[in-house]
Amino acid sequence: MPTPTARTLFVSDIHLGTRDCQAALLASLLRRVRPERLYLVGDIVDLIAMQKRAVLPPAQQRLAARLLRLARGGCEIIYIPGNHDAALRRLCGLRVHRVRIERRAIHVTADGRRLLVSHGDEFDTHVRIAPWMLALGDGMHQFVLALNRWCNRARGVFGLPYWSLASALKRRVGAAQRYVAQFEQAALHQAEREGLDGYVGGHIHKAGFRERNGVLYCNDGDWVEHCTALLETSDGRLQLIDWRGELIEREPVMAAAPVDGVAPLPVAATTS
């Protein structure tokens, strides 16, 4: 399936500086998709992990260079730091050529919808999970990521494409599903409270769409497990794609009645 024209691309949770970063796969996607605007939605560089051990193999260095080439080529890049690169939040408001750092943004789609864009760690306080379960889950997550690395090394030997063992396991864990559901509800509530049409974020490493009361939730996934991105087409439609640029899921169709019988005019702007 050919990759659609990309007006905007949202990626998050790349975790550069760690062994789990799938830099080569993201670079492969960026060779196929050339967006006009690119949102880096947090945890791009894992400054927390790098305090213990920094891992920057050639593939990660090439990815960083490709991002800079995109900016030099005319792509507008908005970097929204997450909890793993929170130290960069002190630079919010900084603009260097076509790259700017923001705490959050309001993205306006080609069809005029206004979407809140943030990493999503601000919603952690709304998720009711016992602290000991969070600590256990984090330890298990690191173990599963290690298994994921070994699994895909073995698949590579046999010429098989990337597959997320971590994702397959998490789909079967009830606590993980409850955490995701509570996170989604918190993000939807925030967008509703601000009178926006939807929300785009990352953080929880679970790509997908949800809709409530005409408000759309979008999560672009991550680049350590699922290797997915959120793409806005030239007409403003949103869809999840994988590292090959292939369609995973389209946004749900919502019946939106025009105000006073007049459809909204397309707007092409981003504000913060």
Image: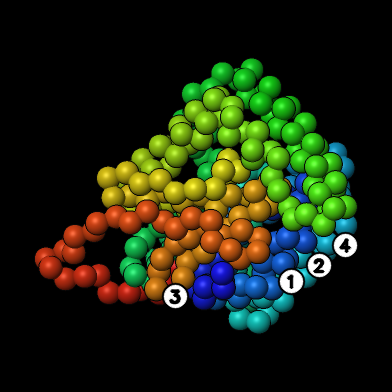
Looking at marks 4 and 1 on the same chain, the residue that comes earlier in the sequence is marked by: 4
Query: Is disc 3 surrounded by few (<14), some (14 to 19) or many (20+) residues within 10 Å?
Result: some
Q: Quadrant of residue 91?
A: bottom right
Image location (x, y in percent) of residue 123? 49, 37
Give the residue number, with chain letter if any, for mark 2: 62
Dot 3 amino acid type: Ser
Q: Which mark is residue 109?
A: none
Three-letter residue code for mark 2: Arg
Residue kind at label 4, given as amino acid type: Pro
- Give above or below for 226 relative to 186: below
Q: Position of residue 203 (x, y in %)?
A: 59, 44
Spatial CA span between label 3 and label 2: 28 Å
The kind of secondary structure element at disc 2 is: helix
Q: CB under 8 Å between callouts 4 and 2?
A: yes
From the image, tell me which residue sits under label 4.
58
Judge whether 238 appears above or below 12 on screen.
below
The kind of secondary structure element at disc 1 is helix
In the displayed structure image, the side of residue 1 where residue 140 appears, left or right: right
Q: Are marks 1 and 2 in contact (CB under 8 Å)?
A: yes
Q: Earlier in the sequence, mark 3 or mark 1?
A: 1
Residue pictured at 87% horizontal, 42% vertical:
53
Residue occupying the point 29% across, 55% down: 254
First in residue order: circle 4 vs circle 3: 4
Q: Nearer the viewer, mark 3 or mark 1?
A: 3
Residue drawn at point x = 66 percent, y = 26 percent: 137
Instruction: State whether residue 227 appears in this view.
Output: yes
Q: Which residue is mark 3?
A: 234
Residue pushed farthest left? 260
Asked whether residue 19 appears in the rendered view, the answer is no
Residue behind mark 1: 66
